[in-house]
Image (spheres, rainbow, N blue to C red):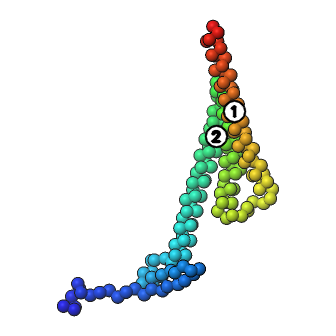
Amino acid sequence: MADSPLSTVKPEAETNETTCNGTTSTIVSGNPYVLTWGAQLVYSLAFVTMILLIAFVSMVVVAVGGNAVVVWIVVAHRRMRSVTNYFLVNLSLADGLQSVFNTLFNFVYLLHNHWRFGYTWCVFAQFCAPCTLSASVFTFIAIAVDRYVILASIASVLYNG
């Protein structure tokens, strides 16, 4: 009965316990495919970094491409040239500048916690971010005022006869 396959017990895998900074980690030496917690952390951070890189690059490509299409449509087609569409071109240019000059550079800074592009680019990037944001906000205000003036003039014509 002792030789039957049902009664055999597999031997325990050898384990090593290590302590680092008050944290105990168990390394299973019987399975070569089980990574240590440090290696798992490094690979998971590399995976997260790649996912973030793909997300940021795709965001910049979509932003620049979409804004370039808006500018091209308004500039290339004569009947699209109106005050409202010029406001939209201004918004597109501000958003495109934000995407090109800040997004990827700030992503690198986010990853490394160190600015790698020199003092001049740091000053320019920190100037460009609030400048493009202000341009967007003021353009939205101008669009709102333009819409208000148009609606107020239509309302005055309708009510005053």
Q: Amino acid at mark 2?
A: Asn
The image shows a total of numbered marks equal to: 2
Disc 1: which residue: 141
Identify the image quadrant of residue 66. Answer: top right
| Residue 89 visible in the snapshot | no
Q: Is residue 48 above or below residue 91?
A: below
Residue 152 lies, in percent from the top left, at: 66, 19
Q: Is residue 89 above or below residue 26?
A: above
> Which of 146 and 88 lies nearest the eye of the viewer?
146
> Counting residues from the N terminus, which is met first, the one under dot 1 or under dot 2?
2
SS for dot 2: helix
- Gap in Å between the C-alphas at discs 1 and 2? 20 Å
* Residue ranking furthest to the front: 22
Q: Are marks 1 and 2 in contact (CB under 8 Å)?
A: no
Rendered image: mark on residue 81: none
Query: Where does the N terminus fall, quadrant-wise?
Result: bottom left
Q: Amino acid at mark 1?
A: Ile
SS for dot 1: helix
Residue at x 22% of width, y 92% of height: 2
Residue count near mark 1 (Cα–Cα under 10 Å), binned few <14, some 14–19, many ≥20: few
Residue count near mark 2 (Cα–Cα under 10 Å), binned few <14, some 14–19, many ≥20: many
* Residue ranking furthest to the top: 161
Q: Is residue 75 above or below residue 124?
A: above
Q: Nearer the viewer, mark 1 or mark 2?
A: 1
* Residue ranking furthest to the bottom: 2
> Which of 142 and 74 lies nearest the eye of the viewer?
142
Disc 2: which residue: 67
